[in-house]
Image (cartoon, rainbow, N blue to C red):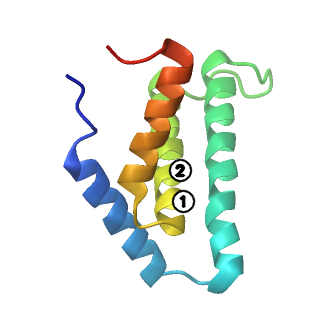
């Protein structure tokens, strides 16, 4: 018996989407594209945190923790869901259906 993510996830995504739209400095297609590009920024922050957690920059040393990496990964997920909500009000259904296809493709049919 699988459960979908908690309803508060989707209400939070809707609220964040509404807040961003209310405070959007750039409208139209350019605003839409910038919303999608925000994902690249967030993924870059994951990379920065991993480099910082492993001390890969000899000039800086260890600057982040693995908890920082977790937080940045959460930011990527949130940003992706808000970007998806920007494209469709049916975010929950689109995501759930896509996840089911990925799961079946990777793990086989659900039993």
Residue drawn 48% across and 24% down? 103
Residue 12 x/y as whole percent = 29, 58
Image height of 87 relative to 73, above or below: below
Q: Secondary structure at mark 2?
A: helix
Q: Quadrant of residue 109?
A: top left
Q: Would residue 68 be seen by someone viewing this image from the given angle?
A: no
Residue drawn 44% across and 46% down? 95
Q: Nearer the viewer, residue 61 or 4?
A: 4
Q: Name the residue carrying label 2.
A: 80
Query: What numbered label is drawn on residue 83?
Result: 1
Would residue 20 be found to the left or right of residue 49 on screen?
left
User: Tags 1 and 2 in contact by the CB under 8 Å rule?
Assistant: yes
Image height of 69 relative to 37, above or below: above
Image height of 45 relative to 67, above or below: below
Image height of 106 relative to 101, above or below: above
Residue drawn 80% across and 26% down? 59
Residue 102 x/y as whole percent = 53, 29
Residue drawn 42% across and 68% down? 17
Query: What numbered label is drawn on residue 106?
Result: none
Q: Nearer the viewer, residue 30 or 4?
A: 4
The N terminus - image quarter: top left
Residue 52 x/y as whole percent = 65, 27
Graded by Cα atoms within 10 Å as few (under 14), some (14 to 19) or many (20 or more), the crowding at tag 1 reads many
The Cα–Cα distance between marks 1 and 2, rounded to whole angstroms, is 5 Å
């Amino acid at each position: 018996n699988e459960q979908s993510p908690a309803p508060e996830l989707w209400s939070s995504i809707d609220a964040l989407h509404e807040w961003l739209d209310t405070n959007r400095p750039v409208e139209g297609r350019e605003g839409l594209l910038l919303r999608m590009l925000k994902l690249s920024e967030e993924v870059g922050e994951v990379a920065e945190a991993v480099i910082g957690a492993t001390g890969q920059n000899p000039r800086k040393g260890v600057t982040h923790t693995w908890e920082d990496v977790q937080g940045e990964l959460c930011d990527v997920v949130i940003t992706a869901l808000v970007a998806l909500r920007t494209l469709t009000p049916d975010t929950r259904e689109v995501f759930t259906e896509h996840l089911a296809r990925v799961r079946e493709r990777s793990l086989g049919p659900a039993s």
